[in-house]
Image: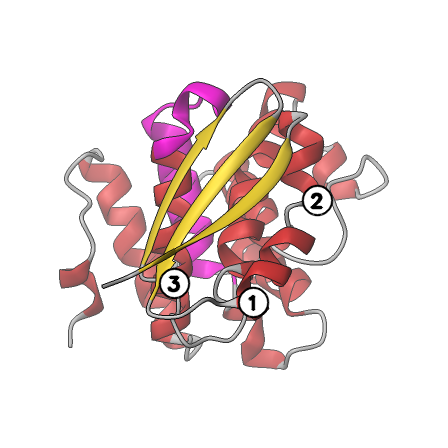
Amino acid sequence: MNAENTLDWSMYSADQQAHLRSALELAQACQYDVQHTHQVLRLALRLFDDLWKLHGLDVEGRFWLEMAALLHDIGWVEGRKGHHKVALQIILKTPLLLLDPRERLLIGLIARYHRKALPSLRHAHYAALSKPDRRSVRRLAALLRVADGLDVSHQSRVTGLRASYDDKSVYLTYTSPTSAPEEERAAAQKGDLLEKVYKRRLVLQYQPAF
């Protein structure tokens, strides 16, 4: 199967589509987990689209998130330990991506923060960003972390997802043939950045898929 054929890039500019093709080629060169990566990508974009009034980012932000989601696990090429940091380094250095330095850093940091430590000014790469770019990284990494948690088993158990919010909470309703407690726990744990950035409690709700 050609993975590109399963992706809809029609909303992006010709240059952005070229960058996405390069990201897909890089992921393939790093022997990425196709099923998991595309599941996380699908869920992350659903969160972005459903919560756009909350995060306030436009199609450029969606492009950054899509790039980061495609590349978030490429560090596995060097092993599991620290793979999020390895992903950042690959994105910053690889000649396969023809991004400018700013976008390399933005996308690399969104991918880097999909797990483990939250964004911090103690991290040199993050501190090097402008304040608006740091805000974008936080908002997008928050979505990617939750999406990654929703496929912690790498079994694509979540078949559908809808997100909404009010003044106090962000509500995620997922559909699945059966409840997915492992994914719920992981998403709740990795919702730490989302709760911090959006100043709302994360609430996960299960809806059976028939």
* 109 shown above or below 23: above
59 within the magenta span = yes
| Amino acid on which disc 1 is placed | Pro
Residue range corresponding to the magenta coloring = 50-72
Secondary structure at badge 3 equals loop
* 143 shown above or below 148: above
Q: Quadrant of residue 95?
A: bottom left
Left or right of 149 on screen, residue 38: left
Q: Which residue, given by chain and number where applicable, does mark 2 sit on?
A: 192
The residue at 31%/61% (across/down) is 159
Secondary structure at badge 2 equals helix
Look at discs 1 and 2 and give the one toward the viewer.
1
Which quarter of the rendering shows the C terminus? bottom left
Q: Which residue, given by chain and number where applicable, does mark 3 sit on?
A: 158
User: How many C-alpha atoms fall within 10 Å of the one at disc 3: few (<14), some, or many (≥20)?
Assistant: many
User: How many C-alpha atoms fall within 10 Å of the one at disc 1: few (<14), some, or many (≥20)?
Assistant: few
The residue at 68%/40% (across/down) is 193
| Amino acid on which disc 3 is placed | Val
* Pick the front one: 64 or 210: 210
Q: Which residue, given by chain and number where applicable, does mark 1 sit on?
A: 181
Q: Position of residue 186 (x, y in %)?
A: 62, 61
68 within the magenta span = yes
* Pick the front one: 40 or 177: 177
* Pick the front one: 3 or 148: 148
Q: Position of residue 116 (x, y in %)?
A: 73, 58
